[in-house]
Image (cartoon, rainbow, N blue to C red):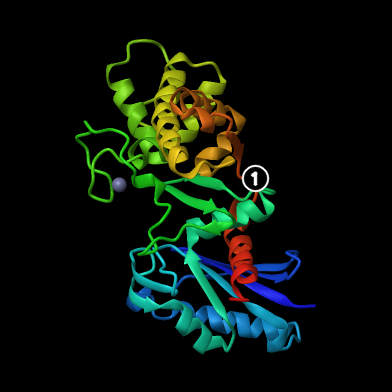
Amino acid sequence: MKYCFGVDIGGTTVKMGLFEETGAILEKWEIPTNTLAEGKAILPDIAFSLVGKIEEKKLEKEDILGIGVGVPAPVTAEGVVNGSANLGWKYKEVKKEMEELTGLKAFIGNDANVAALGEMWKGGGAGEKNMIMVTLGTGVGGGVIIDGKMLVGCNGAGGEIGHICVNYEEKDCCGCGNRGCLEQYASATGIVRLAKQKLETEKRETMLNKEKITAKDVFDAVKAGDEVADEIAVSFGKYLGYGLANLAAVVNPAVFVIGGGVSKAGEVLLSYIEKPYKERAFFADKNVRFVLAQLGNDAGICGAVKLVLDERGK
Ligand code: ZN
């Protein structure tokens, strides 16, 4: 039996998993992310933990096919990161450093792209080769899988769905410095922003309290039949649905996999996205399926392992 490690580096914890090459998860664990001193301890900490696991399980290095790593930053095809705000990294040759630290082959990808690969392998996109994953969290992340492979792009910034422009008239700035980015309407913070704008002038009775509101409150109120919340969700769905229709015209995916904290609202969320999507999608893209992500926090480590299995022979 051969094994793989999947690693998902986040701003506060690093998630790790030991997998059989069949894809079965044997063990999962986490270590804290030490972002002090430009995050210089992060890769050595990971290497120490992985080498310790090899010893604990009495495995041979020859039995390990490789380490897959998801990083919260654009990652080039060569495994190089040019700065990660979450980790404190500047220029870092992640693949080279990981291989030197562990003596194992390493394969690196952007965390959202890697999570998309995981969902295609064992989650909401299982059985498909062309899919777009949309992660609705604090921001809007994404991963585009074309013919079974992650779209990486020349700087590693492929699949940054959150920053396509969906409103040319927007006055407020996105975190990236542009205006009108999808993230300003479809992330958890974006939904709260839409809700606050609406409640500013709203006269009708509503369960929502503009002083204290979350994206979850909006969808809970939707489920309870709140008319104002419904209109906020319609507005959210229109930005996202139209944006995804534009993406579909380029990618022609079989399925959209919707994940992230906001997707915990469940199937009701999909209906708000699918309706406007169908209104604007090119005729040949209208039958695209919308599904919820299934792997939750394991998508990253699963996709990292898939990256090893796909790339190791090349
Ligand atoms: Zn932006």
The C terminus appears in which quarter of the rendering? bottom right
Residue 72 is drawn in which quadrant?
Answer: bottom left
Q: Determine if residue 207 is in view.
A: no
Q: Position of residue 185 (x, y in %)?
A: 36, 35
Q: Position of residue 296 (x, y in %)?
A: 61, 50
Q: Is residue 112 left or right of residue 305?
A: left
Q: Is residue 278 above or below residue 44?
A: above
The N terminus appears in which quarter of the rendering? bottom right
Q: Position of residue 135 (x, y in %)?
A: 49, 46
Of 211 and 147, nearer the camera is 147
What is the residue that sits farthest to the left in this orientation?
Answer: 171
Q: Which residue is mark 1?
A: 124
- Name the residue located 64 percent from the left edge and 84 percent from the top edge: 52
Q: Is residue 59 left or right of residue 148?
A: right
What is the residue that sits farthest to the front in this orientation?
Answer: 284
- Name the residue located 40 percent from the left edge and 60 percent from the top edge: 153
Q: Position of residue 250 (x, y in %)?
A: 44, 43
Q: Is residue 164 above or below residue 121?
A: above
Query: Within 8 Å: ligand 1 and the Cβ of disc 1?
Result: no
Q: Is residue 164 above or below residue 207?
A: below
Q: Secondary structure at mark 1?
A: loop
Amino acid under label 1?
Gly
Q: Is residue 232 above or below residue 55?
A: above
What is the residue that sits farthest to the right in this orientation?
Answer: 1
User: How crowded is the residue under tag 1: few (<14 C-alpha within 10 Å), some, or many (20+)?
Assistant: many
Of 247 and 16, nearer the camera is 247
- Name the residue located 61 percent from the left edge and 51 percent from the top edge: 129
- Name the residue located 37 percent from the left edge and 77 percent from the top edge: 92
